[in-house]
Image (cartoon, rainbow, N blue to C red):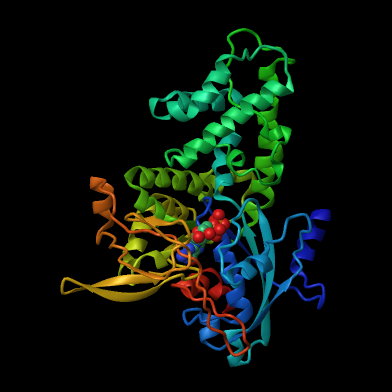
Amino acid sequence: TDELGIALANLTDSATGVLTPTLRLGVTGLSRAGKTIFITALVHNLLTQGRLPGFGPLAEGRFIGARLAEYPDATIPRFAYEQHLAALTGQPAVWPESTRRISQLRIVLKYQSAKWWSGLSGPATLNLDIVDYPGEWLLDLPLLGKSFSEWSGEALERARQPGHAQEAEGFLTELESTDPLKSANDPDAERLAAAFTFYLRRSREHGALSTLPPGRFLLPGDLEGSPALTFAPLPRPAQPIRGTSLYAMLENRFEAYKAQIVRPFFRDHFARLDRQVVLVDTLRALNTGAVAVADLETALTAVLACFRQGDANPLLRPFSRRIDRILFAATKADHVHHKSHDRLEAILNRLVGNAAKRARFAGAATRSLAIAAIRATNEGTIREAGESLPTLIGTPIAGEKLDGTVYDGKTEIALFPGDLPERPDSLFEDGTPVALNFLRFTPPQKLESNADGEPVLPHIRFDRALDYLIGDRMA
Ligand code: GDP
């Protein structure tokens, strides 16, 4: 059959005709969690055999090399690795543009199998397919089980809660002046959708409700403005609903969103992943305060519900395929001193604890790590009142502010970042925010080069992340 043909084409290296195993690695996380940086660093480290003492195949001298290859699915945008690396290694070095949509990249890894030393087999190849997608899109899975009237009911109830009144005001006003039973027309649909999207965006900016579906309204990818994204929740009228009404029009669009956007994403992309890394900007939430931490926890629980697979999740059952490992990574660990790295891991563990338990129950192994895919700071100490304080040394991005100082993006400073609490429980129980001095830094401006003249990207625990995600598949 056709389907079998495609499956075989995916497995076969067209040059050699030999069957090559493929590992499909999903990289996700909410907006600005660090997906783009993670993938760029991952690819660069593999292509140039970066400084990765904790990555088994390299440490054991069995890693032969890597190259980028054509991705088998020509309809999916390619991850813009070269542009991203150019930004990071330019003069001055800047952070590249973030993930806005799904993209993919294939990297072919060549290694000596550990078994080769005993004469069992020769050099081996692994195709590593990296799939980058916004975590916001995972928020849509529950929609598959809801009708338009159920979803509308929940969304409107939330918008009317006192805590959301300010953000939702504009949308609710539009809604009041619209009769759902009037004749279907595009200007009304567009007006309502725009007001609803504005409400979702504002809620996210205020940090209180990053968890609201539909996920594509926050990150539309290439679908911006398409009819399937031009709907909004409507109260269900008590009178009979005619097929030509505005209500019926938006209901149809909601169904189209589910059938033509949400379902294909889960079926064609998500359900085909073998492994997954979920990136979490834990530090930013900690730094914002207890509400942001609680919100992040809710968002992660919603996102991670998708990893409850197979029988445990009826919505995913039709697409079932098993993810066997999930790595939870707290990103940007270079914003705290190394003494806090274990504490950051402990906090992340608490945040994802329930979801991880469920994932393990469904047969996936999980691990939590605090990492920096690209380390933008060094460590030092300053003496203050006879005490020596651990500091971070880095260049704050232009416009960053702390204690009345506005930075110009060129000045290197030493910063006492503050410590994370020793026990994560204290953080979650008494709700006291962690007093961190948190500044965004520019990427490292001076990079060392390896023997081939390739830049070496400094990192924190990135080798361990890599080892967990692919090391065993290169054994
Ligand atoms: P995403 O693609 O939306 O998930 O996020 P990005 O990968 O673009 O990261 C968003 C921003 O976070 C970047 O522009 C950087 O400022 C920062 N960032 C991401 N990873 C790191 C890291 O490893 N270290 C530091 N210092 N900052 C990072």
Task: Give 125 or 386, whichever is nearer the viewer.
Answer: 386
- Percent coordinates x, y for residue 348 in the rendering: 38, 57
Q: Residue furthest top?
A: 239
Q: Residue at x 57, y 20 (%)?
A: 174
- Percent coordinates x, y for residue 460 in the rendering: 44, 72
Q: Residue furthest left?
A: 386
Task: Give 442 or 310, whichever is nearer the viewer.
Answer: 442
Answer whether residue 210 is visible to the viewer in this image.
Answer: no
Examine the image and state in which quarter residue 295 appears.
top left
Task: Give 198 or 295, whichever is nearer the viewer.
Answer: 198
Question: Seen in the image, is 282 located left or right of residue 40?
Answer: left
- Percent coordinates x, y for residue 94 in the rendering: 56, 65
Answer whether residue 105 is visible to the viewer in this image.
Answer: yes
Quadrant of the snapshot with the N terminus: bottom right
Task: Give 276 or 174, whichever is nearer the viewer.
Answer: 174
Q: How many tags in the picture?
A: 0
Q: Residue at x 78, y 64 (%)?
A: 8
Examine the image and state in which quarter residue 395 appears.
bottom left
Quadrant of the snapshot with the C terminus: bottom right
- Percent coordinates x, y for residue 183 in the rendering: 72, 13
Tell me if residue 142 comes above or below residue 402 in the rendering. above
Tell me if residue 24 comes above or below residue 67 in the rendering. above
Q: Residue at x 74, y 71 (%)?
A: 69
Tell me if residue 112 comes above or below residue 469 in the rendering. below
